[in-house]
């Protein structure tokens, strides 16, 4: 039987979360032929064993070795190379596809080369990882790695692409510090394939619960914004306004006392100031003012 859809999941030390994602996939209702490819990026825990525990409940589950180089981009590329289907859909190992996700994405894949499902932010308790403590509106990706005024983009936690198109653009860029999924979306669109939104294909996206890990992630993403700008400025990617950036810094400083009294506000404030700090460091690193 010809495989129609390959679901590719990069994984690194995901023993505590990958089971939930694979259980969510096993519960999908889809009449077509599909497979799941877990690309292990050199895990030192029981990620591979935990993944293989679900082999009996999934139609075609394989684990491939993607340990040659560290990074989600490399793992996604290795998984895509090993995939059998003409259409690839990428998920992350610490999220959860919701009911109807696969059938909806598969239907969209019939007429589009690049598709993006909807990611919904889920903040989970750091100890009881299976408890949802906050369920927000869809993640506004443009606030993290902005594409406003340029091209659309979506996280690779819910992204599909025709295999031939993935190959034509050279896969995911492995030199990106962050924002490799945004860069991939831009590469594909610059090659002439529009990004088609599939809002009914929902994935719950697990946000980092601990504030220090969240701050480090947001800082890295801030540096990644500058790298993205440098990589795509020749194609018209806009640079943020220095005056606007200074105004945002001023707002963050003035609003800082409120972070002492509200945990939700404190988390948002830490994220914003960490991203701004990352942009400042990225501007120095890449010699391009993008605050």
Image (cartoon, rainbow, N blue to C red):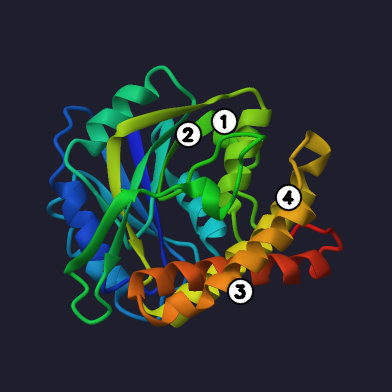
Image vertical order of residue 116 relative to residue 216, above or below: above
Mark linked to residue 253 = 3
Circle 4 SS class: loop
Badge 3 density bin: few <14, some 14–19, many ≥20, Cα 10 Å: few
Q: Is residue 108 left or right of residue 141?
A: left
Image vertical order of residue 79 relative to residue 115, above or below: below
Q: Position of residue 125 (x, y in %)?
A: 24, 75
- For the residues labelled 1 and 2, the Cα–Cα distance comes to 7 Å
Circle 1 SS class: helix
Q: Is residue 210 left or right of residue 100?
A: right
Mark 1 vs 2: CB contact within 8 A: yes
Q: Which residue is mark 2?
A: 161
Image quadrant for the C terminus? bottom right
Mark linked to residue 165 = 1
Disc nearest the viewer among 4 and 1 = 4
Disc nearest the viewer among 4 and 2 = 4
- For the residues labelled 4 and 2, the Cα–Cα distance comes to 29 Å
Image vertical order of residue 37 relative to residue 284, above or below: above
Badge 2 density bin: few <14, some 14–19, many ≥20, Cα 10 Å: many
Disc nearest the viewer among 2 and 3 = 3
Mark 4 vs 1: CB contact within 8 A: no
- For the residues labelled 4 and 1, the Cα–Cα distance comes to 30 Å
First-in-chain label (4 vs 1):
1
Mark yes or no: residue 57 visible: yes
Q: Position of residue 135 (x, y in %)?
A: 25, 57
């Amino acid at each position: 039987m010809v495989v129609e859809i390959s679901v590719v999941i990069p994984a690194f030390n995901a023993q505590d979360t990958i089971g939930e994602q694979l259980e969510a996939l096993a519960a999908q209702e889809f009449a077509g032929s599909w497979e799941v490819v877990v690309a292990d990026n050199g895990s030192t825990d029981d990620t591979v064993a935990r993944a293989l525990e679900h082999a009996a409940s999934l139609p075609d589950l394989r684990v491939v070795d993607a340990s040659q180089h560290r990074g989600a981009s490399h793992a996604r590329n290795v998984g895509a190379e090993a995939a059998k289907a003409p259409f690839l859909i990428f998920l992350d190992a610490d999220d959860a596809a919701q009911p109807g996700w696969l059938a909806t994405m598969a239907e969209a894949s019939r007429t589009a080369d690049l598709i993006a499902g909807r990611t919904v932010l889920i903040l989970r308790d750091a100890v009881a990882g299976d408890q949802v403590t906050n369920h927000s509106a869809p993640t506004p990706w443009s606030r993290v790695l902005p594409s406003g005024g340029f091209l659309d983009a979506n996280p690779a936690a819910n992204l599909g692409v025709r295999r031939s198109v993935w190959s034509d653009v050279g896969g995911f860029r492995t030199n990106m510090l962050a924002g490799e999924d945004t860069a991939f979306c831009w590469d594909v669109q610059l090659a002439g394939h529009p990004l088609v939104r599939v809002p009914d294909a929902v994935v719950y996206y697990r946000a980092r619960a601990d504030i220090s890990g969240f701050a480090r992630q947001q800082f890295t993403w801030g540096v990644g914004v500058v790298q993205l700008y440098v990589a795509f400025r020749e194609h018209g990617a806009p640079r943020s306004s220095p005056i606007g950036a200074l105004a945002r810094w001023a707002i963050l400083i003035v609003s800082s006392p409120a972070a002492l009294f509200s945990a939700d506000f404190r988390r948002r404030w830490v994220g914003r100031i960490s991203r701004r700090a990352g942009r400042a460091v990225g501007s120095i690193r890449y010699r391009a003012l993008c605050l």
